[in-house]
Amino acid sequence: MPRLPHPAPEDLRRDPLPLRGRTALVTGASRRGGIGHAVARRLAAYGASVYLHHHVPHDAAQPWGADRPEDVLASVRAALADPRSRIEAGPGDLTDPGAPAELIGTAAAALGGPLDILVANHALSGSDGTLDEIDAAMLDAHWAVDTRSVLLLVQAYARHRPDTPGGRIVMMTSGQDIAGGMPGEIAYALQKGALASVTRSLSTTLAERAITVNTVNPGPVDTDYLTGEAYEAVAARFPAGRWGMPDDPARLIAWLATDEAGWVTGQVIDSEGGFRR
């Protein structure tokens, strides 16, 4: 096999809009304080058209509450760098086994073509506990949202995407395999661990179609779910003395969506700012 030539000088220069002309679906982009919103803004700022999935009832039932979808949409549109790009949004209850395929089709139609980028950011919060507390309903609920729906999204994405290079899939995990684990959230840790474990299998499956598959562990991120002394205790465990902010993992995820990351696949990447467990 002949060696590839060195890149031409002009090919070494970075495009200020590296996702110009690309289309992306970001799930779980329901709140301006969340990672999904930050990822969508980064992709839009890099030139992509973005479809934001939301499931307001989930956030409305949480202590932090829900944002209005139109406010989230306006915030992402404000970051849009290419006036030809489109920012759209819509709901989806991913506990329904048919919802992932429907969402892929809806997002592609809204953005005017097959999706280039899938960021599966959504997850179920709550309905969990220790080993002694969990039950079958908790396990099934987390399986349906945190794992089954992600795999069905990947399946539908692959089926709908033409055989052209540049496909990007990013899943999310939570550091459950790092020292200490998550003993108080067994159902969540189990299902997020399944995504980390299947990353290599999915990347191998899709490699021949030039679709990369990676999973990001963002570490503790300030998404408005903790306050007071507990918040300060976590901040003290970062060398920088602060929590991760939603845009910290968003920068990594947006880079993984670019051509620069075309040789990175099958990886579970920790983006934790040196967090000390």
Image (tube, rainbow, N blue to C red):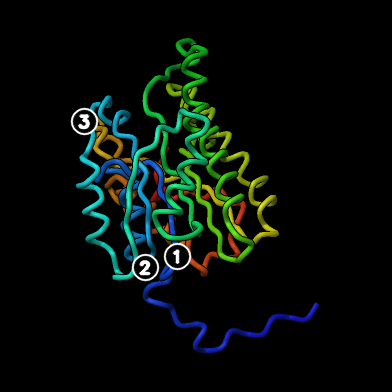
Is residue 171 or residue 97 the one in the foreground? 97
Q: Is residue 186 above or below residue 258?
A: above
Is residue 163 or residue 10 the one in the foreground? 163
Do the residues under discs 1 and 3 have CB atoms within 8 angstroms?
Answer: no
Q: In x, y percent, where is residue 119? A: 46, 49
- Judging from the image, what secondary structure is the residue with disc 3 in? helix
Residue 84: image tag:
none
| Real-space Cα separation, disc 1 to disc 2, in angstroms | 7 Å
Which of the two labelled residues, at mark 3 and mark 2, occupies the earlier sequence position?
2
- Circle 3 or circle 2, nearest the eye: 2
In the image: residue 86, left or right of residue 13: left
Q: Which residue type does callout 2 highlight?
A: Gly
Q: In x, y percent, where is residue 164? A: 61, 65
Residue neighbourhood size for the residue with mark 1, other residues' Cα within 10 Å, grouped as few (<14), some (14–19), many (≥20): many
Do the residues under discs 1 and 2 have CB atoms within 8 angstroms?
Answer: yes
- Judging from the image, what secondary structure is the residue with disc 1 in? loop
Q: Which residue is mark 3?
A: 229
Is residue 262 or residue 89 the one in the foreground? 89
Residue neighbourhood size for the residue with mark 3, other residues' Cα within 10 Å, grouped as few (<14), some (14–19), many (≥20): few
Q: Which residue is mark 1?
A: 22
Which of the two labelled residues, at mark 1 and mark 3, occupies the earlier sequence position?
1
Q: Which residue is mark 2?
A: 47
- Judging from the image, what secondary structure is the residue with disc 2 in? loop
- The quadrant of the rendering that contains the C terminus is top left
Is residue 83 or residue 248 the one in the foreground? 83
| Real-space Cα separation, disc 1 to disc 3, in angstroms | 43 Å
| Real-space Cα separation, disc 3 to disc 2, in angstroms | 40 Å
